[in-house]
Image: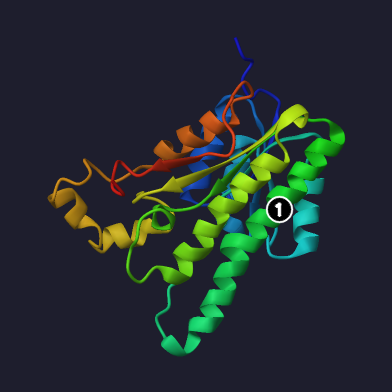
Amino acid sequence: MPEGLKDLEVILAGGSGGLGAATAELLAAEGAQLIVSFRSNAARAARLQALGARIVQADLTASEDRRRLLDEAERLYGLVVFAGDPARVADPERAEEVWRRSLEVNLLGPVLLAREAAQRMKARGTPGAIVLFSTMQAVGLFPGSLAYAAPKAALLHAARLLAKEFRGPCGIRVNAIAPGVIAAGMAEASIAAGKYDRYIEEGVIARFGRAPDIARAVRFFLEPDNYVTGQLLVVDGGLTL
């Protein structure tokens, strides 16, 4: 039987929020050695220290911060990139500004971090797993989500390219998860406002997603004996069907 994640180093980049916290709890229970980064909310991140996680402040769009984060791991096995920006364009005059920020946070930072992590794993001869976070809006067409969905869709293609580049003897797998309406993270406020109630009322989905639904998907991809790479797992209860 596989030995699981005990004593394996896993970085949860941008993992101090609801989805990251649920994942940290699941992985910590299995004995994984966790490193959790946050960009600005230090108090929220500090709560994960109770799980034995090491906490690192890092802006993934900054090369020096990515390097410092990866330096925290002596023998990195897993990288999960939760970081993202909802990229809501409330003011048309700020559309370009929002787009540029979205490209940096939702695409450039995560992809560069994943590539840099994979290069380190390969150089050390360490098999490992990388999980990138996209969104249901990258696979389904939701009006008004262009600035957010387009970079997240590009992220899916980048994940497949990275999986192909690092497949084979080096044993590095790269996959992506596309959450649906999850009662944690970015969607939490929208659920509270009733934005997605119609999907329940019309019977499209049985319930809203929960943070542990995502944590279990991450754990699946991190399994050391996993045979899956270059794939997308949509965790949305069937909403995008």
Residue shown at the point (37%, 57%) measured from the top left: 187
Choose between 54 and 178: the one closer to the eye: 178
User: Few, some or many C-alpha atoms within 10 Å of disc 1 (few <14, some 14-19, many ≥20)?
Assistant: many
Q: Is residue 76 visible?
A: yes
Residue type pointed to by label 1: Leu
Residue lying furthest bottom? 93
In the image, residue 190 lies at what x, y percent?
32, 62
Residue lying furthest right? 123
Residue shown at the point (35%, 71%) measured from the top left: 144
In the image, residue 3 lies at what x, y percent?
64, 15
Say above or below: 44 vs 59. above
Say above or below: 140 vs 226. below
Residue lying furthest left? 202
In the image, residue 40 lies at what x, y percent?
61, 64
Choose between 232 and 91: the one closer to the eye: 232
Q: Is residue 34 left or right of residue 185?
A: right
Choose between 27 and 48: the one closer to the eye: 27
Say above or below: 102 vs 12. below
Say above or below: 126 vs 110. above
Q: How many marks?
A: 1
Q: According to the image, what is the colour scheme of the structure?
A: rainbow
Residue shown at the point (79%, 37%) measured from the top left: 121
| Residue wearing tag 1 | 113
Residue shown at the point (49%, 86%) measured from the top left: 94
In the image, residue 171 lies at what x, y percent?
72, 29
Q: Is residue 35 visible?
A: no
Q: Quadrant of the N terminus?
A: top right
Helix, strand or loop under label 1: helix
